[in-house]
Structure formats: C-alpha cells, structure tokens
Image: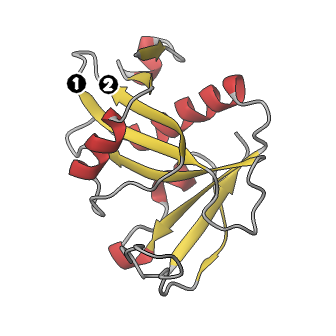
Amino acid sequence: MIEQVRLFADEENKGICLHVEHDISVDEWLREHHYLHSTPAGAILRLSFKDETGKVIGCMMWGRPTSRKIDQTAILELTRMCFVDDTSPFVESKSLGMARKHIRKHYGNVKGLIAYSSTGYGHEGTIYRADNWYALGGSAGGSWENRENRTNRDLSQKIRWTRSP
C-alpha cells in the first residue's frame, strides 16, 4: 500500500514525489543501493522518492535514536538515506525538506531530528548543511558488538547533525 504525498509545486521539486511506504520495499532498495548494504531494525517511517516517470531515485528510513540516552519519543533519527547519482542537483537536501514537512504534519510528537554522517566514507554533512541542520558533536567510533548477532558495519567517527522538523 502506497500513500502519495505532494508537498511542493512541481516547479519547486522538479517532479520529485514523496511516497510513504508501508512494506519492506524501502528496506530492499536501501540494501541494494546504500554503501552499507544493510538496514537497521525498528523503522518508524519509510519514504521513497520517485521522479516524474515513477522511478525510485532515493529512499529514507527514520526510526528511534540509536543512542538510548536520547529521548526515544520526541526525537527521530534518519537511520538510512540514499539517492542514485543520476538525479537533479541538490535532490538530497530538497528531499530532506520534504521529509521534514511530512514529519511535522503527521508526527506532531516529534520535536527534533538527528542524523549522522560517516567521516570514514568521506561524508562531511554537505546535504545537512544545505538543509540548515547543525553539527552537534558526534561519536568516537568503535565497536557496537554489545548485542548478540550484531555486525559492525562502519566503525568510523560520525558527525551528529540535528534540527527541528
């Protein structure tokens, strides 16, 4: 089941359409296209972004914060985001804006958003800066092997980005 949401006029988003997915199609797409080739458990919101032809050009997964020290009800974490390279300029930042608008409208209890960029993969947070997020510390990197069957995927330092929805 797909819920289609048009948040901006066509000239603003250049034909990009946000879709709320209620199945695992986003998980499968991210597993294939994201550099970590995995998806975390516990997604609350799965979004796909399609061009004017209906082709998926990117996906996002939003969930509870990974850190148990962060409010699990008032904060959403962008746990995965990936867009194909052959898209219009700034599509990632525009799509973040579309996602934030959807979250404001449909998740009124959410007061803040966080995301992490991986320094080990050269991600400096350019797309977050372009959408007016700000850096707020980060993680030291290291092992996450504190749970059975957990696989370390990216042990590099991360920059934590935050902003309001």
Residue placed most toward the observer, 109 or 129: 109
Q: Secondary structure at mark 1?
A: loop
Residue drawn at x 25%, y 18% is 54
147 w.r.t. 24: above or below? below
Q: Amino acid at mark 2?
A: Lys
Q: Which residue is mark 1?
A: 55
Say which label, 2 or 1, has the lower sequence index.
2
Which x, y percent locates residue 19?
43, 22
Q: Amino acid at mark 1?
A: Lys
Q: Is residue 101 left or right of residue 126?
A: right
Q: Is residue 29 left or right of residue 119?
A: left
Label 2: few (<14), some (14–19) or many (≥20) C-alpha neighbours in 10 Å: some
65 w.r.t. 56: above or below? below
* Colour option used: secondary structure
32 w.r.t. 11: above or below? below
Residue 50 is marked as 2
Residue drawn at x 24%, y 43% is 84
Residue drawn at x 38%, y 54% is 39
Q: Is residue 138 left or right of residue 142?
A: right
Which x, y percent locates residue 125?
49, 62
Residue drawn at x 49%, y 87% is 142
Residue placed most toward the observer, 26 or 111: 26
Contact between labelled residues 1 and 2, with CB atoms less than 8 Å apart = yes
Instruction: Calculate the distance from the C-alpha at mark 2 to the C-alpha at mark 1.
Output: 5 Å
- Whether residue 132 is visible here, answered yes or no, is yes
Quarter-wise, where is residue 22 in the image? top left
Q: Secondary structure at mark 2?
A: strand
